[in-house]
Image (spheres, rainbow, N blue to C red):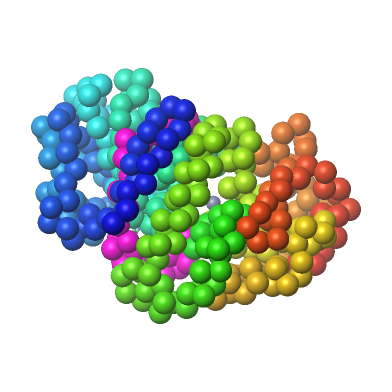
């Protein structure tokens, strides 16, 4: 099984794609203390399988509540409290066992504990495997918005095992696939074609161990790694990972984060971004239809009706990525390329939004 090596200006670390859960020999070794952080659901399913694999001087467990609503400073306090109570020192390690919510919080908590200790990520959702666990962006939400408090802190290692996905609700699994489509559509037409060819649930093994996903997970991580290597702090090309997201964030906002999972909103956002690409003449109708139909086949059929074009338009400016009131859109150029565009007029945008009314 492959190991990818991520190299950023601040760190180099392996992403080990392997059978951590079922390989008897797989171990995580650390000479000092370890604090493993998880939530009740994931701990119930996997703690008994992971704990025996950790070889450390002492291992402690911190269970935090499940859900995006708990991705807050309060839970960070809880993790820090646990770390202090067990007297973790600067040589100690934290381990994140869970989805993107857990990995974002453990990255953050370990990044500020005694000015920063190491952490390892064991992502258990597809979204966390292909996106959240790699790249070092971590943080929490507050009343003003999502991910507004945080830092860049790269993990010491990431362990990916698709076997975790066998217990993931199918809806969560499909939502994760939106991020895979996102990177392939912008960066790799070959991988996009291969996913098209194998997009039935049966080919991908979505009904069982999801083993058919391994090559796609690997390719998605490779792409993210290349992007992060070039632009760790998102001053340029890393923004391309936001394809579909400018629209998705508005949809999530207008539906109070209740109607769609993030990946589902991204699926809709990709369709909207493609409509804009067509309007700007950088994507053909045929290419746009290919992406639509791939999303459909992967089970991302959700639709959103724009009730009030003006209201939707205003919401773009709430996004933390809009600077000085300028909107910047990441758009796929055909399939396999992208453009960052900050020259889109209000008229062009409203015309596109009108198509989703
Ligand atoms: N740091 C980044 O670069 C980055 C990138 C993308 C997303 N994110 C963040 O990731 C978060 C979303 O992550 P997510 O989609 O993984 O959600 P999540 O962590 O909330 O997990 C979704 C649900 O699945 C459960 N779960 C996790 N693994 C399971 C398993 N193997 N079996 C059964 N249930 C399981 C969780 O307990 C949770 O209820 C958001 O907060 C987002 O901001 C961060
Ligand atoms: Zn996303």
> Residue 243, position in %: x, y?
63, 52
In the picture shown, does residue 206 fall above or below 139?
Answer: below
Give, as a single range, the part of the protein colored magenta: 150-176
Q: Quadrant of residue 88?
A: top left
Residue drawn at x 49%, y 37% as measured from the top left: 229
How many marks on residues?
0
> Residue 164, position in %: x, y?
30, 60
Pick the residue in front: 212 or 112.
Answer: 212
Q: Is residue 256 magenta?
A: no
> Residue 90, position in %: x, y?
25, 21
Q: Is residue 171 magenta?
A: yes
Residue drawn at x 77%, y 36% as measured from the top left: 325
Viewport quadrant of the N terminus: bottom left
Pick the residue in front: 203 or 297.
Answer: 203
Query: In the picture provided, is 30 more to the left or to the right than 67?
Result: left
Viewport quadrant of the C terminus: bottom right
Q: Quadrant of residue 210?
A: bottom left
In the picture shown, does residue 335 fall above or below 331?
Answer: below
The extreme right residue here reads: 347
Query: In the picture provided, is 307 more to the left or to the right than 41?
Result: right
In the picture shown, does residue 273 fall above or below 205?
Answer: above
Viewer can see residue 338: yes
> Residue 351, position in %: x, y?
85, 60
Residue drawn at x 45%, y 33% as measured from the top left: 8
Viewer can see residue 51: no
Residue drawn at x 54%, y 32% as measured from the top left: 233
């Amino acid at each position: 099984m492959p190991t990818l090596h991520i190299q950023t200006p601040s760190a180099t670390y392996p992403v080990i794609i392997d059978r951590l859960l079922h390989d008897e020999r797989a171990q995580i070794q650390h000479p000092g203390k370890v604090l493993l952080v998880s939530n009740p659901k994931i701990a119930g399913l996997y703690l008994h399988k992971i704990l025996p694999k950790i070889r450390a001087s002492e291992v402690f467990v911190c269970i935090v509540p499940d859900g995006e609503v708990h991705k807050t400073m309060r839970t960070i306090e809880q993790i820090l409290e646990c770390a202090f109570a067990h007297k973790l020192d600067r040589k100690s390690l934290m381990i994140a066992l869970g989805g993107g919510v857990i990995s974002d919080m453990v990255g953050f908590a370990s990044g500020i504990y005694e000015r920063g200790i190491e952490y390892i990520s064991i992502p258990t959702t597809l979204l966390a495997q292909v996106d959240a666990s790699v790249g070092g962006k971590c943080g929490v939400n507050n009343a003003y918005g999502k991910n507004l408090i945080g830092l860049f802190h790269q993990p010491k290692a990431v362990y990916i095992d698709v076997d975790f996905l066998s217990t993931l609700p199918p809806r969560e699994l499909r939502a994760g696939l939106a991020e895979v489509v996102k990177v392939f559509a912008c960066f790799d037409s070959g991988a996009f074609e291969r996913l098209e060819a194998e997009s039935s649930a049966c080919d991908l093994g979505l009904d069982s161990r999801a083993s058919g996903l391994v090559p796609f997970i690997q390719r998605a991580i490779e792409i993210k790694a290349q992007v992060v290597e070039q632009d760790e702090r998102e001053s340029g090309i890393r923004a391309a990972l936001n394809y579909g997201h400018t629209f998705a964030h508005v949809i999530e906002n207008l539906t109070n984060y209740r109607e769609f999972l993030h990946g589902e909103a991204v699926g809709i956002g990709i369709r909207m971004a493609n409509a804009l690409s067509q309007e700007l003449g950088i994507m053909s109708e045929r290419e746009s239809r290919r992406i639509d139909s791939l999303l459909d086949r992967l089970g991302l059929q959700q639709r959103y009706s724009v009730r009030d074009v003006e209201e939707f338009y205003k919401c773009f400016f709430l996004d933390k990525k809009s600077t000085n009131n300028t909107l910047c859109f990441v758009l796929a150029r055909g399939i396999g390329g992208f453009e960052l565009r900050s020259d889109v007029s209000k008229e062009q945008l409203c015309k596109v939004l009108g198509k989703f009314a």
